[in-house]
Image (spheres, helix red, strand yellow):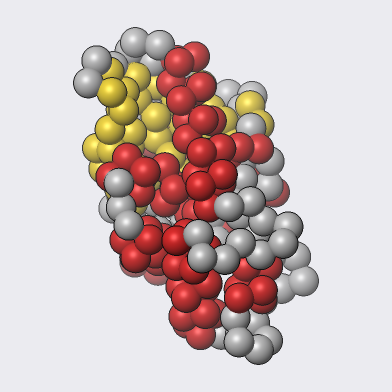
Amino acid sequence: MAVVLLIRHGQASFGAADYDALSDLGRVQARTIGTALAARGVRPDRAVSGSLSRQRDTAKLCLQAAGLPEDFAVDDRFDEYDHLGLAAALGDGPVPTSSREFQAVLDVALEQWISGAVTPGGLPTWAEFAARARAGLDDLLAELGRGGSGAVFTSGGAITAICAGLLSLPPAGCVAMHRVVINGGITKIVSGRGGTALISFNDHTHLPPNQVTYR
């Protein structure tokens, strides 16, 4: 049985000119993940990151803190969708700068996008986005083979797409799952004779309360 941990990146810089950069807290979260992996004796055979800065930087800091080699692969199939562009395209008015208000706008936009009702220009359909992330996971599982383990540093949307697909969730269920993915949360996927399955979602017991963030 192969095991893959899907790790959401540390907190990005919401509201800043460069959202893709890890915040100071995001860097702390990344190191906390690494310390937790080391404490649990987790030593993945292969580490992969999406191509976004926040994903790659989380991978580097996490692996350093875990005392593991930093030679992770980059696979852009684990990149996030353009959540700011989606909210701007389907929202009513300017994109909110408040995290709570932004989430409300994003939830509505996401349900429209996931259901296939609307696909803003420049974005793939949700089905295409989800298929891309799942293909990245399937290829990694095939490379790992029986008994192998991997870690993927990715984002909330990609994690949601993979998990919602495994659970056959409707659009509203996808949105509800997406809303609660925590920065630095760890989701466990296994693959064996019975196929690929979700074992645990969004584990964040390694994060102290002052490091728990959603955006």
Residue 40 percent location from the top left of the image: 31, 33
Question: Between residues 81 and 149, which one lies in front from this camera angle?
Answer: 81
Question: Between residues 119 and 21, which one lies in front from this camera angle?
Answer: 119
For image coordinates 51% across by 22% down, the residue present is: 139
Q: Hey, which quadrant is residue 194 in on the image?
A: top left
For image coordinates 53% across by 52% down, the residue present is: 126
Residue 67 percent location from the top left of the image: 51, 29
For image coordinates 42% across by 51% down, the residue present is: 160
Question: Between residues 204 and 156, which one lies in front from this camera angle?
Answer: 156
Q: Is residue 105 visible?
A: yes
Q: Is residue 27 visible?
A: no
Residue 21 percent location from the top left of the image: 69, 58
> In the image, is 168 to the left or to the right of 51?
left
> In the image, is 184 to the left or to the right of 118?
left
Quarter of the image with the N terminus is top left
Above or below 204: residue 17: below
